[in-house]
Image (tube, rainbow, N blue to C red):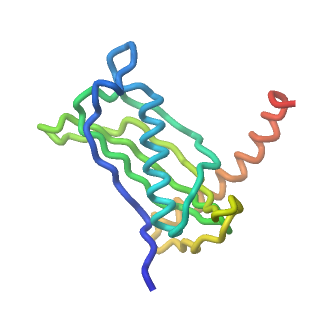
Amino acid sequence: MKIPQRDITLRFLAEPQDVNFGGKVHGGAVMKWIDLAAYACAAGWSGRYCVTAYAGGIRFIAPIHVGSLVEVEAKVIYTGNSSIHIALEVNACDPKSLDRKLTTHCIVIMVAVGPDGKSEKVPQWIPETPDDQRQHDTAIKLMEMRKKIGKEMQIFVD
């Protein structure tokens, strides 16, 4: 049996079309890269087509400059029946120095779906190290927090 791929790193150079009016990489471009890495990670874990169900806790820490080497690291931190919770970090640096700096981090939840668009079961991820267990436990705490936030957000959608 093939072992699912738990993590993935996308690497590329930030291009001029990614720039905002302030001369730095646009936050929307970073969010697109995050979504792409989350998809690749979730598909590698589940062996299925996956869709984004949630993206949250995004924190933009430092700007990314055009020409920077960008690394988007994604790893599974929790699985439900059909959901895959993924922690993501974006690091960037001048490709000549390779002195990477954290620029962005967040959590994305992907859901595996079949050809009919209905959710499908995914392989369970089981923490193996103390660090894995901390991330797994944090993912569970974040789920509870999202439920509370979802209830509070109802005022904006009713």
Q: Residue furthest left?
A: 96
- Which residue is at 25% across, 37% downward? 13
Rendering quarter of residue 124: bottom right
Q: Residue furthest bottom?
A: 1
Query: x, y (%) of residue 112?
Result: 61, 62
Q: Which of 137 and 117 is in front in this view?
A: 117
The quadrant of the picture occupied by the C terminus is top right
Image vertical order of residue 135 relative to residue 124, above or below: above
Q: Which residue lies furthest to the right in this view?
A: 158
Image vertical order of residue 140 relative to residue 105, above or below: below
The quadrant of the picture occupied by the N terminus is bottom left
- Which residue is at 52% across, 55% downward? 86
Query: x, y (%) of residue 66?
Result: 26, 27
Query: x, y (%) of residue 58?
Result: 53, 37
Image vertical order of residue 19 relative to residue 138, above or below: above
The answer to whether 113 appears left or right of 59 in the picture is right
- Which residue is at 19% across, 34% downward? 94
Image vertical order of residue 82 relative to residue 149, above or below: below
The answer to whether 12 appears left or right of 122 in the picture is left
Q: Nearer the viewer, residue 123 or 146?
A: 123
Query: x, y (%) of residue 92?
Result: 29, 38
- Which residue is at 41% across, 62% downward? 7
Q: Nearer the viewer, residue 46 or 73?
A: 46
The answer to whether 3 appears left or right of 70 in the picture is right
Rendering quarter of residue 114: bottom right
The answer to whether 145 appears left or right of 158 in the picture is left
